[in-house]
Image (tube, rainbow, N blue to C red):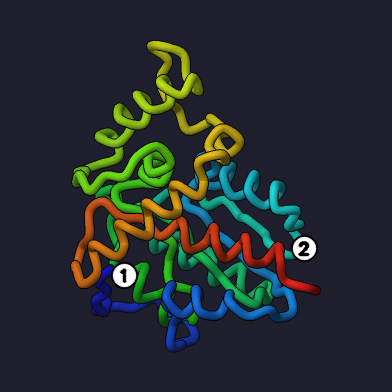
């Protein structure tokens, strides 16, 4: 995913930043468990998903803490993570947010790099695209999240997760329903990532699989 320097970068300790590619390499080796801080954009979809994933992996909040944001733009998520980092002193920090036409998207990437966070776990246009990948692979570009939702609803109805005519809403806790297809979603996201290599602004895209695999590795680390 492309990054470009912000003319007015967020203040904070500068660092080299950490790419998702480096993260995948590091999780191949066993090491002492770390305290991980994950700051997500909202209080519903992403927050509920990662809370459920952590419970399933038996990762306590003492090991992996998920903090909901207050909505707003991606840069606000990154700056909130920095304030929490100063207070909580985590070993790693992840920021999870959508593109979905929100302002300060590229600035958020630069700020995360300056702070030394892991590469943001971003989705274009939104987190719900990650849900869609559980059911099928697609390279169809989406202008906004509202274009993803009808396609996701069709898959959820076909899978009997939603009733005919029922609408998707962000309050749904879908982790348990999607879990049997988690490896399909990871494979689809990786395939998409490989096919989009070198694209400046890939659409659609998601990095959620990187964080999911990292958390799965944390379960297997010998404390």
Q: For the residue carrying disc 2, how many other residues have a C-alpha within 10 Å: few (<14), some (14-19), or many (20+)?
A: few
Residue at screen point 59% across, 42% down: 48
Residue farthest toward the right in the current orientation of the protein: 223
Asked whether, in this view, residue 36 is left or right of residue 137, the answer is right
Up/down of 61 relative to 165, above or below = below
Rendered location of residue 69, percent (x, y): 52, 52
Q: Secondary structure at mark 2?
A: loop
Q: For the residue carrying disc 1, how many other residues have a C-alpha within 10 Å: few (<14), some (14-19), or many (20+)?
A: many
Q: Nearer the viewer, mark 1 or mark 2?
A: 2
Residue at screen point 57% across, 70% down: 83
- Asked if residue 63 can be seen in this view, the reply is yes
Q: Which residue is mark 1?
A: 107
Corner quadrant of residue 176:
top right
Of residue 39 and residue 56, the one placed in the foreground of this image is 56
Asked whether, in this view, residue 26 is left or right of residue 202, the answer is right
Looking at marks 1 and 2 on the same chain, the residue that comes earlier in the sequence is marked by 2
Up/down of 156 relative to 180, above or below = above
Q: Which residue is mark 2?
A: 62
Rendered location of residue 72, percent (x, y): 40, 50
Residue at screen point 43% across, 72% down: 20
Q: Secondary structure at mark 1?
A: helix
Circle count = 2
Residue at screen point 61% across, 67% down: 84
Up/down of 191 relative to 222, above or below = above
Rendered location of residue 115, percent (x, y): 48, 80
Quarter holding the C terminus? bottom right
Up/down of 26 relative to 78, above or below = below
- Asked if residue 117 can be seen in this view, the reply is no
In three-dimensional space, the C-alpha distance between marks 1 and 2, rounded to whole angstroms, equals 30 Å
Rendered location of residue 118, percent (x, y): 49, 74
Of residue 132 and residue 114, the one placed in the foreground of this image is 132
Corner quadrant of residue 85:
bottom right
């Amino acid at each position: 995913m492309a990054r470009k320097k912000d003319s007015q970068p967020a203040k904070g300790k500068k660092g080299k930043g950490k790419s998702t590619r480096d993260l995948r390499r590091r999780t191949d080796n066993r090491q002492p468990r770390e305290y991980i801080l994950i700051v997500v954009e909202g209080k519903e979809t992403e927050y509920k998903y990662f809370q459920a994933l952590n419970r399933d992996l038996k990762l306590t909040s003492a090991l992996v803490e998920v903090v909901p944001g207050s909505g707003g733009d991606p840069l606000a998520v990154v700056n909130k993570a920095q304030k929490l980092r100063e207070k909580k002193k985590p070993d790693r920090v992840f920021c999870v947010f959508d593109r979905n036409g929100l302002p300060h998207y590229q600035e958020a990437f630069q700020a995360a790099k300056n702070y030394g966070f892991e590469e943001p776990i971003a989705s274009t246009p939104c987190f719900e695209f990650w849900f869609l990948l559980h059911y099928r692979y697609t390279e169809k570009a989406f202008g906004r999240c509202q274009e993803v939702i009808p396609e996701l609803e069709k898959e959820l109805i076909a899978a009997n997760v939603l009733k005919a005519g029922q609408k998707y809403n962000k309050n749904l806790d879908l982790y348990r329903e999607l879990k049997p297809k988690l490896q399909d979603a990871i494979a689809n996201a990786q395939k998409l990532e490989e096919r989009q290599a070198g694209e400046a602004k890939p659409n659609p895209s998601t990095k959620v699989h990187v964080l999911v695999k990292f958390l799965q590795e944390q379960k297997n680390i010998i404390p």
